Structure formats: structure tokens, C-alpha cells
Image: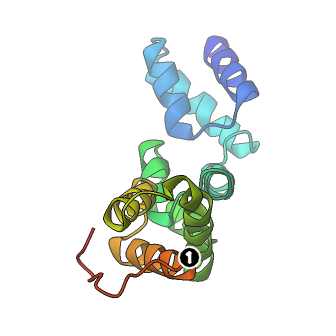
Amino acid sequence: MERARAICLRLLTGTPRTRKQLADALRKRDIPQEAADEVLSRFEEVGLIDDGAFADAWVESRHHGRGLSRRALAQELRTKGVETPLIEEAVAQLDDEQEEATARELVRRKLRATRGLDRDKRIRRLAGMLARKGYSQGLSLRVVRQALEEEGEDTEFLGDGDF
């Protein structure tokens, strides 16, 4: 039990972790399940483990820091073992307008690097960057099209399925 407590405290000092991440770490170190459950439950009671707060902080950090979409953030939280209701609550912090504004900013930052390339290649690069961050094809295409039009690029013949 003391060993399990020490392992959890050491892991929590570096960075916040989910209950599942700590449970996995204890399992890898051959801590008996009963001892692990007891320590993890106690840590939750005193607030050292809080998956809801972890999810909220993760969304805030990864959206503003890396520009990830709600879909990408939800996937990352699932892999960290956060339960679906907590994920839904955390990603609900971001609304459609915020997500679109972030996508626009990401495209704006990358736009300059694509100057000189032909239109189709620019569209693929910009939309691909947004896709890797979890943005939908429709939103990506709309944001890229608007950014290119603002720059004076002809996007008249660009259909919804063109990438």
C-alpha cells in the first residue's frame, strides 16, 4: 500500500494524471489490484485525482496551445481513460464559433508558407493541416476557401468535395 501511494505521488508531482493512467502505472509495477484501488479511491476523495478537472485543463491547454478541435481532444481524453460524460462536459467549453476562430487562426499562420504554390497544393496543405488537428472536411474547406479569397486567390471553381 505504501509503495502504491509513493508511486502515485511521484507520478502526480510531474503532471496531472487520470485515474486510469495511475492504475496502469501501478499494474505495470505489480501492485496488487486491491491496494491500487484503495490508494486510487483515497486520492480521489482528497482531490489528488480528478478526471473532470484533468479533462477541463487538457481541453484548455491543447486547444489554445495546439489548436486541436473538439473531436481530436475527445479522442485524446478517451485514450487517457477519461469517462465519456466528463469528456463531453470538457469539450463543451468550446463552441462552434471558438473552434472556427481557431481554425481560421491556424490557416492564417500557415498561409504565408504556402504562397508561391499552386492553388490546389495550397488547399491540400492547409486543409490537411486542419484535418490532422481533427477539424471536419466541411469546416476546413470553408475556412481555407475564405482565407484564399481574402488573399485574392480564385476559388470559384472549388467544389465541396475538392481537396
Residue at 52%, 80% (x, y): give it.
152
Q: Is residue 40 visible?
A: yes
Q: Residue furthest bottom?
A: 156
Residue 55: % across, % down: 60, 54
| Residue 137 figure quarter | bottom left
| Residue 14 figure quarter | top right
Q: Nearer the viewer, residue 120 or 80?
A: 120
Residue at 63%, 11% (x, y): give it.
3
**Looking at the rendering, in which quadrant would you find the C terminus?**
bottom left
Q: Residue type at mark 1: give it.
A: Glu
Residue at 56%, 76% (x, y): give it.
151
Residue 21: % across, % down: 52, 33
Q: Is residue 92 visible?
A: no
Residue 157: % across, % down: 28, 85
* Residue topped by disc 1: 151
Q: Residues within 10 Å of mark 1 (few under 14, many from 20)?
A: few
Q: Nearer the viewer, residue 28 or 64?
A: 64
Q: Is residue 32 left or right of residue 112?
A: left
Q: Residue furthest front?
A: 116
- Against 96, residue 16 (above or below) is above
Q: Secondary structure at mark 1?
A: loop
Residue 75: % across, % down: 42, 53
Residue at 46%, 27% (x, y): give it.
24
- Against 9, residue 81 (above or below) is below
Question: Which colour scheme appears in the figure?
Answer: rainbow
Q: Is residue 102 left or right of residue 152?
A: right
**Looking at the rendering, in which quadrant would you find the N terminus?**
top right
Q: Nearer the viewer, residue 68 or 159?
A: 159
